[in-house]
Each structure stands twice: as structure tokens, then as C-alpha cells.
Image (spheres, rainbow, N blue to C red):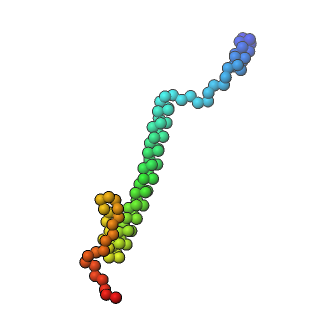
């Protein structure tokens, strides 16, 4: 019995240490799904923040143009166009 214990101890000392982590394919797939979902969520949050900023800038630009007596619009080729209003009352200096 004692010799068996010594033999097992020697065998244990000669074998490499066991790995600390054992992952199954299911674990790796879940990790992949969570990583992809997190990445998509962060990207979506950043995109929404950028769109909100652009929307507020667009409103401010339109408001400033209309208060100054101009019509502001986006053209078909995505250029911003500002034109004087035809029916704007302008006092003579």
C-alpha cells in the first residue's frame, strides 16, 4: 500500500500540471455570442449618439437660417443650401 502511494506520488510529480481552465465548445460559442452582442450594442450606442448630435446641429442650423431671413435645406446631393427668402421684408437703410 505504501509503495503504491509512493508510485502515485512519483507519477504525479512527473506529469505536467493540469490546465486551470477547461472550456467546452458550448462555452466558446456562448462567449462568442456574448462578445458579438456586446460589440454590436456598443457600436449602436455610439451611432445613436452621433445621429442625435447631427440632428441637433441640423435643427440649430435651420433655426439660425430662418431667423436670419433665409430658407435652408439639404439638396439631393447632400449639400446644405441657404437661399434668401423671396418674400422677406427688408427695411431700407
Of all residues shown, which one is farthest toward the bottom? 93
Q: Quadrant of residue 72?
A: bottom left
Q: Quadrant of residue 37?
A: top left
Q: Is residue 44 visible?
A: yes
Left or right of 46, for residue 22:
right
Could you tell me residue 15's position as x and y percent?
67, 20
Q: Nearer the viewer, residue 26 or 72?
A: 72
- The one nearer the camera, 41 or 74, is 74
Q: Residue at x 26, y 76 (%)?
A: 86
- The N terminus appears in which quarter of the rendering? top right
Please give the name of the residue rendered at 45% of the width and 40% of the height, measured from the top-left corner. Answer: 36
Which residue is at 61% across, 30% downward?
20
Horizontal and vertical percent position of residue 80? 35, 64
Quadrant in the picture for the C terminus: bottom left
Residue 50 shown left or right of residue 11 in the figure: left
Disc count in the image? 0
The percent position of residue 25, horizontal first and vertical second, equals: 49, 28
- Tell me where residue 68 sits by quadrant: bottom left
In this view, the residue in front, 58 or 40, is 58
For residue 5, say whether it is visible.
Answer: no
Above-or-below relation of 22 to 68: above
Q: Nearer the viewer, residue 58 or 70?
A: 70
Give x and y (percent) for residue 66. 33, 73
| Side of 1 where 64 appears, left or right | left
Residue furthest left as drawn: 87
Amino acid at each position: 500500500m505504501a509503495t503504491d502511494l509512493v508510485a502515485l506520488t512519483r507519477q504525479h510529480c512527473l506529469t505536467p500540471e493540469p490546465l486551470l481552465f477547461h472550456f467546452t465548445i458550448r462555452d466558446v460559442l456562448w462567449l462568442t455570442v456574448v462578445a458579438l452582442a456586446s460589440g454590436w450594442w456598443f457600436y449602436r450606442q455610439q451611432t445613436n449618439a452621433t445621429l442625435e448630435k447631427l440632428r441637433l446641429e441640423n435643427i440649430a442650423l435651420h433655426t439660425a437660417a430662418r431667423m436670419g431671413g433665409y430658407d435652408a435645406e439639404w439638396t439631393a446631393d447632400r449639400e446644405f443650401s441657404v437661399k434668401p427668402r423671396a418674400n422677406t421684408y427688408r427695411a431700407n437703410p
